[in-house]
Amino acid sequence: MLAGQKLLAVIPARGGSKGVPGKNIREVAGKPLIAWSIEAAQRSRFVDRVILSSDDTDIIRVAKAFECDVPFVREQRLAQDDTPTIDVVLDALDRCPGYDWVLLLQPTSPLRTAEDIDEAADLCIQHRAPACVSVCPVQKSPYWMFELSADDQLQPLLSAPKLVRRQELPPIYCLNGAIYLARTEWFRQHRAFIAEGTVAYKMPLQRSFDLDTELDFQQLRIFLEDR
């Protein structure tokens, strides 16, 4: 429980991935990709229940093998390429009522740990925040990025300070997709994890892999072998 309130972790994993077929159950360092998120949630001090939302029988079978709760099969209308993840989470909350907090864990972020989950939850309590999302430092600062005009002239993407050394630029963060946490009623009201009041939990680049392509899987494999 989180500050005496119940927390539901939702792992969304539909079948039919086109970029990397079968990616959610593809083996990563000896176990299916989805198992990494299941185990992290199960080890969290705050998560009361871990459920899978999926339309795919193979993904459901694998999730159950790792003792993840699968209380329903996701409807096909919520398993399309353009289905918003927010709608998937709302569907899970409707089917599994009675939780004060909801945690979205995308299986494509396998290196997120139980400690990351717990520290993000602690951050919400410390700041009395309604939501928290995970971020990581950007590898290339947008202060060094440009758009091109019709005649190929450089147009700064941001109103940046005059050209300075990289070390002098302000720190910039981006979403890494690993953790989305919010109070349930606040989430229902905003239909989002990011709105006024959301705080950021900073994660290092080394745990911020977000797998979407074959190249991402290759890079993760090399990273894990080196580690």
Image (cartoon, rainbow, N blue to C red):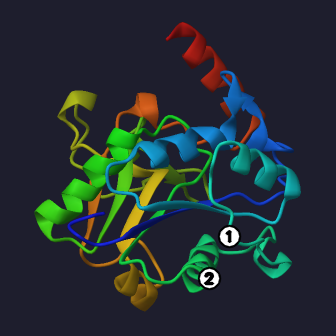
Which of the 4 image quadrants contains residue 34? top right
Measured as percent of width and height from the top left, residue 158 is found at 35, 57
Q: Which residue is mark 1?
A: 71
State whether residue 214 is above or below residue 90. Answer: above
Q: Is residue 5 left or right of residue 215?
A: left
Percent x, y of residue 50: 53, 58
> Which residue was labeled with disc 2?
95
Callout 1 amino acid: Pro
Q: Can residue 16 be seen by looking at this rendering? A: no
Q: For the point 80% across and 50% down, which residue is it?
A: 61
Residue appearing at x 63%, y 59% in the figure: 69
Query: Residue type at mark 2?
Result: Arg
Relative horizontal placement of residue 10, taking residue 7 as reference (left or right)? right
Q: Nearer the viewer, residue 207 or 10?
A: 10
Of the pair 14 and 80, the residue shown nearer to us: 14
* Drawn side of residue 25 relative to residue 37, left or right: right
State the CA–CA distance, disc 1 to disc 2. 8 Å
Tag 1 and tag 2, C-beta contact below 8 Å: yes
Note whether 148 is above or below 23 in the view shown. below
Depth check: give the residue in front, 213 or 158: 213
Report x, y in % for residue 10.
55, 63
Residue 190 locus on image (x, y percent): 41, 86
Q: Secondary structure at mark 2?
A: helix
Which image quarter: residue 21? top right
Asked whether the viewer can see residue 112, the reply is: yes
Q: Nearer the viewer, residue 23 or 41?
A: 41
If you read the primary sequence from the N terminus, does the residue marked by circle 1 or circle 2 appear first?
1
Mark 1 burial class by Cα count in 10 Å: few <14, some 14-19, many 20+: few
